[in-house]
Amino acid sequence: GAVVSQHPSRVICKSGTSVKIECRSLDFQATTMFWYRQFPKQSLMLMATSNEGSKATYEQGVEKDKFLINHASLTLSTLTVTSAHPEDSSFYICSASTSGANVLTFGAGSRLTVL
Amino acid sequence: GIQVEQSPPDLILQEGANSTLRCNFSDSVNNLQWFHQNPWGQLINLFYIPSGTKQNGRLSATTVATERYSLLYISSSQTTDSGVYFCAVEVTGGGNKLTFGTGTQLKVEL
């Protein structure tokens, strides 16, 4: 079945630094990837939609200059949290789909802790 | 935007018990999925069920799209069923964008 790999699974960084999270589709071409954020004991909230070769579409309230998304190939999307602050500490999850697919495949998530 | 409410928010079961989880949504959808999020955060797709009924082992799901709700049945629960259950929906023309429900935290005890 379809597999989505996310890296790193855990990252701790200092306030003010930038962190990059990678999301790879291992056995299929992902025309669209989605980035979600999940705070403790809460549901998943969609941050942005990225389509290969075009700019990401951000959900309302998500700062595009803070959460940089790049989808340069059909198998890789990256999320960069720039100038991270403690309030950015969260669980970030990516998902991917191929054109025409109804079911999304999710990565295992990346837990970011900003000190 | 669409609202997706799940009930109950929390549920504790004895091993072997049955349970029903509910998902209500506020608008027409063309995609509904049920997920299990394990304690490590991994989301596992249980069902793709925009309408009708499906069964997979001890789990089954029913979606009544015209009445805007879906049910997930867990029979003979096991401790490994513990975790959070989410339904997620895509509004018609939503381009695969899923809106997740509020979740049900399930704990199955011996």
Image (spheres, coloured by chain):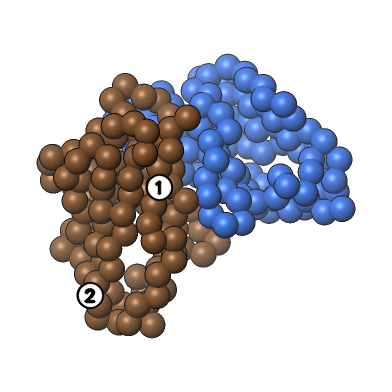
Chain colours: A brown, B blue
> For the point 29% across and 32% down, which residue is it?
A29
> For the point 76% across and 38% down, which residue is it?
B19
Calculate the distance from the C-alpha at mark 1 to the C-alpha at mark 2: 25 Å
The amino acid marked with disc number 1 is Ser
Left or right of residue B108: residue B54: left
- The chain letter for the residue carrying disc 1 is A
Same-chain check, marks 1 and 2: yes
The amino acid marked with disc number 2 is Ser
How busy is the neighbourhood of tag 2: few (under 14 within 10 Å), some, or many (20 plus)?
some
Q: Give residue A83's mark.
A: 2
Nearer to me, B4 or A72 = A72
Q: Check the image and report above or below for B27 versus B9.
A: above
Left or right of residue B3: residue A24: left
> For the point 65% across and 33% down, which residue is it?
B72
> Quarter of the image containing the N terminus of chain B?
top left
Q: Check the image and report above or below for A66 versus B40.
A: below
Q: Indicate the quadrant where residue B90 lies.
A: top left
Nearer to me, A56 or A22 = A22
Left or right of residue A56: residue B69: right
Q: Check the image and report above or below for A32 versus A36.
A: above
